[in-house]
Image: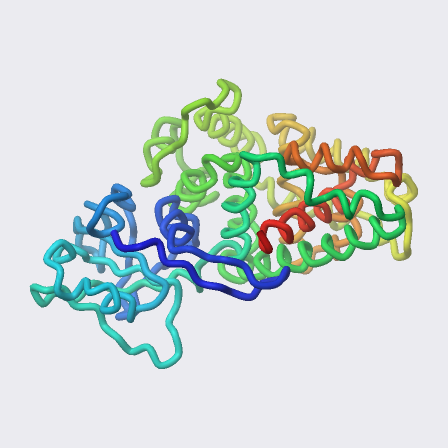
Amino acid sequence: MGANRVEQAQGWYGAYTLSERVIQKIWLAQDFLATGLSTVSGKSLQVKHPGRWNLLSGPDFKEAQFILDGVELTGDVEVHFSASDWYAHQHHINPAYDAVRLHIILNATAGDTCVARTSNGTVPEEVHLLPVLHRDLETYALDLALCELEQVDGSNWAEPFLVLPSIHQQAILEAHAQRRWQEKLRFAKQRFEALGWAEASHQYCLEVLGYARNRGPMAAVAQRYSLSVLVENQVSIEELFLASPVAWHLDGVRPHNHPCRRLQHYLAIVAECPDWPDRIAQHLQRMVPLVGDFTTSVFRRRTELPARCRNMREQIFMNRIGTRRYNTLMVDALLPLATAAGIIDAEAYWQHWPAGDTPNRVQSLMRRMDFANGRGIRTNGYVQGMLGLSLAKAAKA
């Protein structure tokens, strides 16, 4: 394992720092679209296990298991920003890298035609991650930064914002929320174009049910077991749980949040409502298109939003998903996806929808805001705006 190289990149909130460790974590969690994955040489690739993360010298991941063009292989994996890093780090003359079979790079760099070769003459297959990411790279990087910020008192940075007049606070949060909506919509379009409405909904739902800690393993399960497979076959919870090539994170998980319980709930939803994505689409199509600048209370009253939220959760998900997690599913996945699919222009609903799971730090900051007497915390648009503001701080830190 070489030095944890860092680079500067340009994102929504200005320049941010990106380290190779972020790319390594993406590979470890298999947090990308693995369906139809192929190498640069055109060989099909299915990852059975990403390998053991090596924090010492040598390749980044040891003893990965994968199927390359139908042939099962075991080998090491090395992760870099660009192909030329293989030679910059002198891996080509280091026998410790002779067992590397996959060279994972972020993306091809213009003019970079390097082909990795080990000291014994083998050529690892090259895989580009950027084209198959579920989210923008900045979000991956900032998620890691936020996790680190959670370990310290992160409220002092917000003092200049909290003393602003309420009208200025609202304008700032609305601008950040708009950026987040556009990013969610952009990636929803990519997923819809690749998978279609039903399968994209299926994958999104399982990922959301995985929460932050088990999103990667849930994504792997969703990619291996399509919605149609679950509908047409008797698949056990144990089979799904063992299907993930990515290790589940179970330490400290409460019993009601255990992945097996979440898988059990999802299988029950599929059994009772096998066409649940189409049912969601039908509900969304009946939503009233309301144009204008409305407060959340007026918007919700005129669109009957509380009743519509409750009906979908009860009639389609049979209350098997908790209220906050259901709202997270809607605002982070299904509303952007429905817009990408042309089912409804859901931006206004996304803004005024009840907030889903919200980081404690964001909740505490919003309680200190002047406007709406703190009631804005229950509105997704303001929560998204405050989260965007937090991410902006993390990007500059």
Q: Position of residue 258 (x, y in %)?
A: 47, 24
Q: Position of residue 42 (x, y in %)?
A: 28, 69
Q: Position of residue 379 (x, y in %)?
A: 78, 40
Q: Nearer the viewer, residue 65 or 20?
A: 20
Q: Is residue 55 left or right of residue 133?
A: left
Q: Measuring 56% from the left and 40% from the top, which residue is drawn there?
A: 149
Specify the quadrant of the image occupied by residue 229.
top left
Q: Nearer the viewer, residue 147 or 223?
A: 147
Q: Nearer the viewer, residue 137 or 302?
A: 137
Establish if 209 lies above or below 25: above
Q: Measuring 62% from the left and 33% from the top, which residue is drawn there?
A: 325
Tally of numbered discs: 0
Establish if 306 lies above or below 199: above
Q: Measuring 36% from the left and 50% from the top, which residue is drawn there?
A: 24
Q: Position of residue 35 (x, y in %)?
A: 39, 55
Q: Nearer the viewer, residue 385 or 20?
A: 20
Q: Is residue 355 left or right of residue 105?
A: right
Instruction: Tell me the colour scheme of the image.
Output: rainbow
Specify the quadrant of the image occupied by residue 78.
bottom left
Specify the quadrant of the image occupied by residue 279.
top right
Q: Is residue 139 left or right of residue 369?
A: left
**Residue situated furthest left in the rendering:** 120
**Residue situated furthest bottom in the rendering:** 111
Q: Measuring 34% from the left and 62% from the top, which residue is drawn there?
A: 105
